[in-house]
Image (spheres, rainbow, N blue to C red):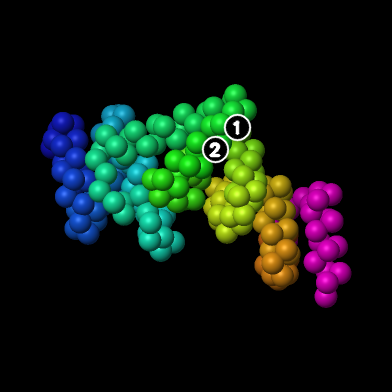
Amino acid sequence: MDKQQYKQYVTDLLNEHNRQSIDELVALYEDRDFIRDYASEDTELGYIYIVTCIYREEHNEHIKNNIMSVRRTKERLIQIITYCKFLLWRIELMFDDEAVEELMRYLDYEKLSVIFLVEMIRIGSIDKISMYIKLSEVYKKQMLDTYAFQLLRYANNQEPGNEQIVCMLADMCIQYGNIESAKKLLETIEKPGRITEVLLRKVYSDE
């Protein structure tokens, strides 16, 4: 197939939206030759590569409301990604509180997962760590601690060993009485700073 045929094939698979078509789409984007020759060279095909990466991660985490849960056209998926990247740009570079509110509303309205948000930060933010932390704090303020923890956990997978993220995860574990998990997290920090030392004293004083 040439590029236009592949684009039509991707469009058709998304429009069919059943288990077989989704599996075929994922399999297509696992083909290294296709990625090298087409997905990396074409913007539309590249965006759907992002979609399949998000879906695979969501599927591995058994997330019911994933990016492929509802039928969305290729154009709609691209629109969702570009709009979220635009909002993240406003948040990061313009310190726009209205954009934060709009992003949270949009994620909820479109039923987009924390994994989706992490991937948007990964591909669209300059200071990824600051964005992970900022948006986890937003979730906390909204009393959505589960989402905040998920965001930090996925962020730690993307940026392993960052002291601030690990300490925030450990602190949440301590708050909910999961001292052993807090210890394991803190032990992953190679060069403990002041915050880590404070939390280490806290977890070992509870023994």
Q: How crowded is mark 2: few (under 14 residues within 10 Å), some or many (20 or more)?
A: few
The N terminus: image quadrant? top left
The C terminus: image quadrant? bottom right
Residue at 45% across, 47% down: 108
Quarter of the image where one finds residue 106? top left
Identify which amino acid the numbered label 2 is placed on.
Glu
- Residue 13 x %, y %: 18, 47
Task: Identify the residue position indicated by label 1 in the image.
Answer: 97
**Magenta residues?**
187-207
- Residue 11 x %, y %: 19, 40
Above or below, 124 relative to 10: above
- Residue 97 x %, y %: 60, 32
Residue at 48% across, 42% down: 105
The answer, for residue 46, to whether it is visible in the render is: no
Task: Identify the residue position indicated by label 2 in the image.
Answer: 101
Relative horizontal placement of residue 57, taking residue 188 as reference (left or right) = left
Relative horizontal placement of residue 196, taking residue 107 as reference (left or right) = right
Quarter of the image where one finds residue 170? bottom right
* Front-lying residue, 149 or 8: 149
Number of numbered discs present? 2
Q: Residues within 10 Å of mark 1 (few under 14, many from 20)?
A: few
Above or below, 12 relative to 179: above
- Secondary structure beneath label 1: helix
Relative horizontal placement of residue 207, taking residue 156 as reference (left or right) = right
* Front-lying residue, 118 or 106: 106
In the rendered image, residue 117 lying in the magenta stretch gets the answer no
- Residue 193: mark in rendering: none
Disc 2 to disc 1: CB gap under 8 Å:
yes
- Residue 19 x %, y %: 22, 59
- Secondary structure beneath label 2: helix
